[in-house]
Image (cartoon, grey):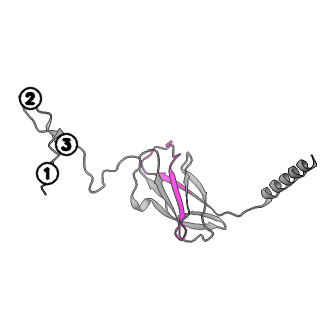
Amino acid sequence: MALRLSFLALFLLTTALSSCLVVSASLVEGKVSCFDCPNDYDYSGIMISVSCGHTKTRFTVSTDKKGEFRSELPSRDKTNCDAELQGSFKQLYASTKNVKSKIVNLAGDKYGLSSKLIFLKSCPRSLGSFGSSKTVDLPVPPEWGLAPTSYYLPFLPIIGIP
């Protein structure tokens, strides 16, 4: 019985000491922004990756309803750290220059983003090589019994001859 009480006392003492030890962790705080979202848009579930260039450690955190996130920096050396917009369970569109941001020291052990992480919820029209998905439907006489030309005209089969 005395042995159990001594183990219980030792356990309680170690848990009390471990809760008293304060570890100074460097926190990075940031926020994602949406260019074409309404004011009441729910930003929760957007994944942000936080990493430092000289280590292979990478943390992935998700945003809250307002688009804010908080994470510890994965390294003791806080130089050359990045935050990167990874994605969401919803379809997001973003430019490559708005997906990644450097992490900078704001004050003491508080870090923030040097630029905004911005995305779009709808596909932008000015994506260069992407065009309209409309197809051309040429008129075919109904007597011919063919399907509309939009079903087979844009597709040109490639026949490989060795």
> In the rendered structure, which segment of residues is drawn in magenta?
30-55
Amino acid type at circle 2 is Pro
Amino acid type at circle 3 is Thr
Horizontal relation, residue 149 to residue 37: left or right: left
The residues tagged by marks 3 and 2 sit, at their Cα atoms, a distance apart of 19 Å
Element type at mark 1: loop
Amino acid type at circle 1 is Ile
Disc 3: CA contacts within 10 A as few (<14), some (14-19) or many (>=20): few
Residue found 71% across the figure and 64% down from its top: 24
Disc 2: CA contacts within 10 A as few (<14), some (14-19) or many (>=20): few
Residue at mark 2: 142
Residue at mark 3: 135
Element type at mark 2: helix
Up the image or down, 54 lies above or below 116; here it is below
- Viewer-side label of 3, 1: 1
Up the image or down, 17 lies above or below 108; here it is above
Labels 3 and 2 touching (C-beta < 8 A): no
Which picture quadrant has residue 60? bottom right
- Which dot marks residue 27? none
